[in-house]
Amino acid sequence: MKQFKNQKEMFAYIWETREHVSELTGEPLFPPNHFKHHWQYLHVLPKGTYPKYKLNPNNILLATPEEHERQEQYLKFIYKQDELRKEYYKEFYNKTFD
């Protein structure tokens, strides 16, 4: 996996490599010069609780700022969160789930 020094670098990489629409609804996203642009990068596993995944691009979904505020309402977010939690605990604690 590509290593990043900070979120800004990771967000730029994500913007360059993904379609510029919400991964939750397909809605178009704001361009980089918009003041809400950085709110469109949704950490699936919270960076405070899972600091080792803070700079993991697989832990980011692109979403509108409004969707970011209501992320738990989207099934795609819930499934991705469950998948990443299992991955995280397997990688760092060698723990698996059925």
Image: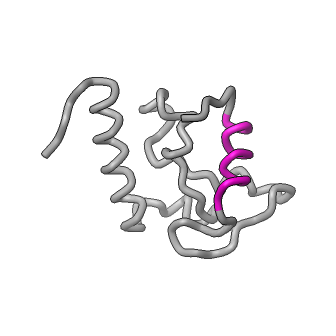
Q: x, y percentage for residue 38?
A: 71, 50
Q: Is residue 28 magenta?
A: no
Which part of the image, by quadrant, shows the N terminus?
A: top right
Location of residue 4 by image quarter: top right
Q: x, y percentage for residue 37?
A: 75, 56
> Looking at the picture, does residue 26 appear above or below residue 47?
below
Q: Is residue 14 magenta?
A: yes
> Looking at the picture, does residue 67 appear above or below residue 95?
below
Q: Is residue 44 left or right of residue 39?
A: left
Q: x, y percentage for residue 6?
A: 68, 30
Main SS of the magenta part reads: helix
Frontmost residue, 63 versus 16: 16
Q: Residue furthest left?
A: 98
> Looking at the picture, does residue 65 appear above or below residue 94?
below
> Looking at the picture, does residue 61 appear above or below residue 75?
above
The residue shown at (60%, 66%) is: 66
Q: How many marks?
A: 0
The residue shown at (47%, 27%) is: 52
Q: Is residue 28 left or right of residue 82?
A: right
Type of colouring: one colour
Q: x, y percentage for residue 87?
A: 33, 39
Q: Is residue 30 left or right of residue 71?
A: right
| Residue segment shown in magenta | 7-18
The residue shown at (80%, 62%) is: 31
Q: Residue furthest right?
A: 33
The residue shown at (62%, 52%) is: 41
